[in-house]
Image (cartoon, grey):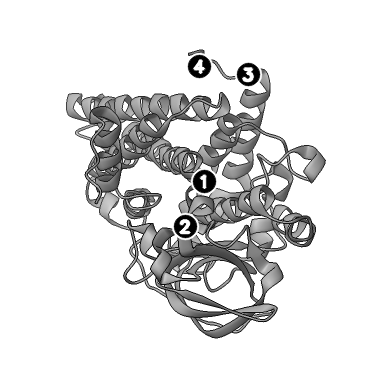
Amino acid sequence: MFLELTEEQRMIKDTLRKFMDREIIPLANEYEQERKIITRDILKKLEPFGYVGAEIPEEAGGFGLDTVTYCLMVEELGRAWGALRTMVTVSNLVTSLIYKFGTKEQRERFLQPLIHLDYLGAFALTEPNVGSDASSVETIARRDGDDYILNGTKTLITNGSIADVICVFATVDRQKGAKGITAFLVEKDKATYLTSDIPKMGMHSSVVSEVVFEDCRIPASNRLGEEGEGLKIALSGLNVGRCIVAFGVIGIAQACVDAAIRYATERRQFGRPIGSFQLIQATITDMVMELDAARLLAFRAASMVDRGVKCSLEASLAKLYATEATLRIANKAIQVHGGYGYTQEYPVERYFRDARHLTMAEGTSEIQRLIIGRELLGLSAFV
């Protein structure tokens, strides 16, 4: 596999790095420490770069990028601000699903506002009793003439309380199991539902919400795909999603390495920079080694997506290793900073908290291990 970036990819990455350093990173610490939610004007700063609609063809109003290029963009955003990255890539997921499965009218109505970050999207699959077993959705969608009526609760939904359009998965018939699950587009300004944000460990400037539907009426024209296609729609982008999470967390790992190197060259003890001590050098070397391994695994998976090659094994390996390795890298970055690493005076404690969430997103580390085991052994641990 050829791993050299193209000239265009290098240019995109360099441009984004400079932009993030100048426009985004200076905002992150203040917003995170004060738990201020990222505002729409900050989101709009990203519009010219194509963070939403990146892989949608240009003729459909998108940016026509391949998966590897988009993942490089995600890495730079993750390096700058984990909360902003998760808000944007979740919205991009919803946009991609509307492009792939939406009607002409749905595309015309939703794609451009989402791509231009005038709208924000949310993906509502998880429920209080439904996590890794996505086929057990309990939220009900009952047909009533030209409408559907939704009843149920979604939880841990990124962007849930602030999204303009939520892709909601509900069952039209519990007796059908997975074949009853159906996707719906619920518009904030046209439907009635309740939301409450859930306090969390990291990514303080983004929201995860509980979303409660009580006789929430939406038009049948807002159904995404056919009845019973919901699980297929929900799972259609799993490999891409795992690549995106991998590169997002690799961005955090890169930020940890950058911070550790910077601190080790500036901080002096016993009359010299602490970076001159063997244990500090060994620690930073281990951090870089794990980061490089994670990045290579993620590049392999993303390139396989672009080539249309089956990559369930490779995407799960990349996601699992990158998230777990970043936790180790962040922990070492805190240790390099000593007592200061535990304080909010330096960002490494935030990097650790933000990375912890990503061991659960797009399938927990435990689920990834079961997927990898199934691919290797041909035997499923799932019931």
Q: Taking 366 as reference, is 242 left or right?
A: right
Q: At 31% across and 24% down in the image, what residue appears?
A: 289
User: In the rendered structure, which disc, 3 or 2, sits on the residue that comes first in sequence?
Assistant: 3
Q: At 31% across and 35% down in the image, what residue appears?
A: 321
* Residue furthest bottom in the image: 215
Q: Secondary structure at mark 2?
A: helix
> Can residue 206 be seen in this snapshot?
no
How far apart marks 2 and 1 lie (CA) works out to: 35 Å
Picture disc at residue 3: 4
The one nearer the camera, 244 or 276, is 244
Which residue is under mark 3? 6
How far apart marks 4 and 3 lie (CA) works out to: 9 Å
Badges 2 and 1: C-beta atoms under 8 Å apart? no
The one nearer the camera, 71 or 373, is 373
Which residue is under mark 2? 29
Label 4 amino acid?
Answer: Leu
Residue 336 image position (x, y, % from top left): 25, 39
User: In the rendered structure, which disc, 4 or 2, sits on the residue that comes first in sequence?
Assistant: 4
Label 1 amino acid?
Answer: Ser
Picture disc at residue 236: 1
Label 2 amino acid?
Answer: Asn
Q: Taking 226 as reference, is 263 left or right?
A: left
User: In the rendered structure, which disc, 4 or 1, sits on the residue that comes first in sequence?
Assistant: 4
Crowding near pointer 2: few (<14 within 10 Å), some, many (20+)? some
How far apart marks 3 and 1 lie (CA) works out to: 28 Å
Q: How many circles with numbers are drawn on the protein? A: 4
How far apart marks 4 and 1 lie (CA) works out to: 26 Å
- Foreground mark, 2 or 1, reads 1
Crowding near pointer 4: few (<14 within 10 Å), some, many (20+)? few
Residue 38 image position (x, y, % from top left): 56, 64
> Can residue 187 be seen in this snapshot?
yes
Q: At 54% across and 44% down in the image, what residue appears?
A: 77
